[in-house]
Amino acid sequence: MNLDEKPLARQVEFVFKQLEEELLHTSAGTVIIQVRNNVVGKYGVRHNPIESKNGQIGESEKGMTLQQVQAFRQMAIDSIKLKRSWTHGEIMYDFSVRTATSSWSASIQFESNYNLANGMFRYQPKHAGQLRDTP
């Protein structure tokens, strides 16, 4: 799949399809998508810490179902409409599943990145001859 030719929303859909198996049965974490020139560069899931008691890891909590993962993916795709006027940055989708009610929630954070070196201001060192004091 050539991501350069796909709209960002389609790229986010592709990312979530790739992460589907990892998101299944995950109870909380953050999906991170790094964007450069409106193209997804890196993506992944940061899982919340796994707790242990007396050195023993207990059973994992019940996490996202397939239907919840699919709804999460659709929410992520729809959220791209909120992105305005930036081409470089990071998108973070924090999510958690409440085991008591089997409901889930997510929040979205956009981070835009700019590089001053690519802008109109460029650092130009002064030559040694220009540094002398004039009488």
Image (spheres, rainbow, N blue to C red):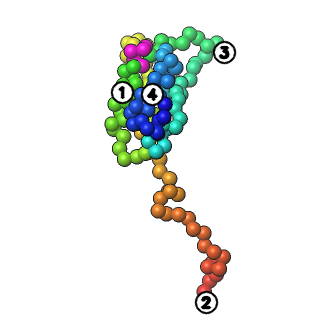
Which label sits in the foreground, 2 or 1? 1
Say which residue label 4 marks: 14
Give the SS element for disc 3. Answer: loop
Is 32 inside the magenta-drawn segment? no
Instruction: Pick the quarter of the image with the C terminus.
Output: bottom right
Label annotation for residue 29: none
Q: Pinpoint residue 48: horizontal percent, then vertical percent.
A: 53, 24
Q: Pinpoint residue 132: horizontal percent, then vertical percent.
A: 64, 81
Q: Spatial distance from mark 1 to mark 3, Cα to Cα? A: 37 Å
Q: Spatial distance from mark 1 to mark 4, Cα to Cα? A: 14 Å
Q: Spatial distance from mark 4 to mark 3, Cα to Cα? A: 38 Å
Range covered by the magenta-colored residues: 65-69
Q: Quadrant of residue 97?
A: top left
Q: Residue at x 35, y 44 (%)?
A: 84
Evaluate if marks 1 and 4 touch, with contact meaning CB atoms under 8 Å apart.
no
Label 2 or label 4, whichever comes before in sequence order? 4
Which residue type does callout 2 highlight? Pro
Q: Spatial distance from mark 2 to mark 4, Cα to Cα? A: 67 Å
Label 3 or label 2, whichever comes before in sequence order? 3
Give the SS element for disc 1. Answer: helix
Query: Which of the two residues, 62 or 40, is positioned nearer the viewer here?
Result: 40
Say which residue label 1 marks: 75
Label 1 or label 4, whichever comes before in sequence order? 4
